Amino acid sequence: MSQKSKKVVCHISLKDGVLDPQGVTIRNALVQLGFDDVVEVRSGKVFELTFKPEVTNDVRAKSEEICRRVLANPVIETFAVEES
């Protein structure tokens, strides 16, 4: 029987209080399109990591390290890891 690849989704978002010009631009466009019920938009990034099937160690811990060291800027961003 073949092993299945392990997948993890990493959500990167700006910390509260950090200016989000892309979110502001999107919100303004939504208002112009008639979606004036939207009060705020915060932008972010999503990364899907696929690990080799033979990986036996903790993919969550490895993914969190990848977020900390490569994907997220810890000064202005936070991250959440979700195994899928």
Image: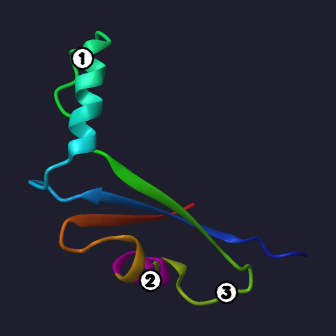
Residue 34, horizontal then vertical, whole percent: 28, 9
The span from disc 1 to disc 3 (Cα, nearest Å) is 47 Å
- Quarter where residue 57 is shown: bottom right
Q: Which residue is mark 1?
A: 31
Please say whether residue 45 is one of the residues in the magenta stretch: no
Q: Amino acid at mark 2?
A: Ala
Q: CA distance from mark 2 to mark 1?
A: 40 Å
Of the numbered discs 2 and 1, the one sitting upstream in the chain is 1
Q: Earlier in the sequence, mark 3 or mark 2?
A: 3
Between marks 2 and 1 in the image, the one whose residue lies nearer the viewer: 1
Q: Label 3, secondary structure: give it.
A: loop
Identify the residue under disc 3: 55
Q: Amino acid at mark 3?
A: Val
Q: Residues within 10 Å of mark 1 (few under 14, many from 20)?
A: few
Q: Is residue 63 above or below residue 14?
A: below
Q: In the rendered view, does 49 fall on the left or right side of 29?
A: right
Of pointers 1 and 3, the one earlier in the residue sequence = 1
Q: Contact (CB < 8 A) between labels 2 and 1?
A: no
* Contact between labelled residues 3 and 1, with CB atoms less than 8 Å apart: no
The residue at the far bottom in this view is 57
Residue pictured at 41% horizontal, 83% vertical: 65
Q: Which residues are magenta?
A: 62-68
Residue furthest out toward the left? 17
Identify the mark at residue 61; answer none if there is no mark. Answer: 2
Looking at the rendered structure, the kind of residue marked 1 is: Val
Give the secondary structure at mark 2.
helix
Instruction: Please identify the residue farthest to the top as the structure is shown.
Output: 34
* Residue 64 pos. (x, y %): 40, 78
